[in-house]
Image (cartoon, rainbow, N blue to C red):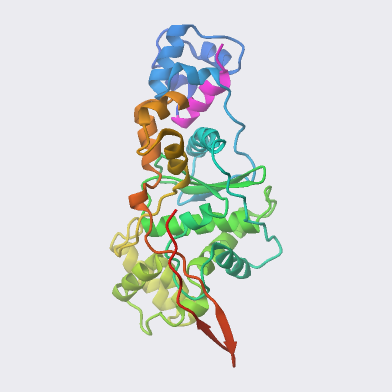
Amino acid sequence: MIHGERVRQLRGLHGMTQAELVKEIPYLTQSQLSRIESGLAQPDEETVALLAAIFGVTTELFKRPPIADLTAHSPQMRARGKLTSRDKASGLEWARLIEEFYLTLQSRAKIIPTKLTQLHEAAPQEAAQEVRSLLGFNPIEPLPYLILAIERIGVTVLGLPYRNDALDAFSAWRDDRPIIAILSGVPGDRVRFNVAHELGHLVLHSRRPIRLSSEIEAEADQFAAALLTPLHAIRHEMPKNPTLSSLAMLKTQWGVSIKSLVRRARELGVIDQERAISLYKQISARGWNRAEPGYVAQEKPRAFRKLAEISYGPGPNTEKMATEACWSEELTLAVLEQHATVEELPFQSPPRLVPVINTSKVVALKPQERKRA
């Protein structure tokens, strides 16, 4: 017996309509497929084998019921353009499939307790300061990395082998577990801002928001900017007469986009609105809206791959992993590729600040090095 909901999940994951799927199986009608997905009919073994081949899984996966949908917290979608319902469904189904196996792997290891708490009454800037402290970073320096830090406080971060020009990332709560999903093909600076933005949603907003989407998106943006580039810290680094070249250098130091730094310069009063608009136009004219110059390291989540290494040894052994997950090896490799190897981890440990208050001055002691995860 197979679970029709699994067929519906995998079809949605691949962004296929019922009409498109039945074209791949000529003897199957849309009406028959609808009955299968609704649990009113069972396909024969040949049909199940064909479905498995189309979706890149094994026939055994259809015998397992999928976990519940990700519906809490909307989920919030970090979109860069018009997002269709099909695009949204694909992203959610990718996250649900990967999270399902993540939970299987996690059951064999020590679970990191969730330290992230919601701060509904806090202003975005205040909440960002609290989260910076929770992550173990001092309040005045650039964050050397972000994703690994939030995994260490119990946030589940999933890398999806799914690319969509209308979507970068999204977040949700699964009971009391915060989840952030990151799509592939996104530049490093935007990955950091997207993750910070989604972290803002998780911290600031109700799991079933009732306010206008534009309001909560603006607050998540404010949180992300305050987390990555606190005004009191970036003020001393901002050039007096910023150009795109000088901002590109600052981008590499702080790990944020040039456009984000233009906004910060405007907020600091370093430039006026007219100059900000001029810089935005220059960015657009140079085709930098999609990918800017200036290096920012590509961050990936680590926990999923680390859990796989615990279960299947160094590498990990993708053949064994694929067998248990009921995925093809191609799908297994695609998912693993979205998660960091040891060699891809950041080398710098988070700085620790021990403040000494003396006539309103703060002296930061040198950070101690810690081993990587």
174 sits left or right of 323 in the view: right
Name the residue at 62% across, 51% down: 114
Vertical order, 186 against 105 (above or below): below
Q: Which residue is at the front of the view, 11 or 295?
A: 295
Q: Is residue 203 visible to the viewer in this orientation of the structure?
A: yes
**Residue 305's x, y, as percent?**
43, 41
Instruction: Say which quarter of the image contains residue 357.
Output: bottom right
Instruction: Say which quarter of the image contains residue 299.
Output: bottom left
Q: Which residue is at the front of the view, 11 or 143?
A: 143
230 sits left or right of 54 in the view: right
110 sits left or right of 299 in the view: right
Name the residue at 56% across, 18% down: 4
Q: Which residue is at the front of the view, 200 or 370?
A: 370
**Residue 152's x, y, as percent?**
53, 54
**Residue 85's x, y, as percent?**
52, 37
- Position of the N terminus, as image quadrant, is top right
**Residue 59's x, y, as percent?**
46, 16
Q: Main secondary structure of the magenta part?
A: helix
* The residue stretch that appears in magenta: 1-15
User: Does 9 lie within the magenta span?
Assistant: yes
User: Does 52 lie within the magenta span?
Assistant: no
Vertical order, 22 against 72 (above or below): above
Figure disc tally: 0
Q: Is residue 85 visible to the viewer in this orientation of the structure?
A: no
Name the residue at 39% across, 24% down: 56
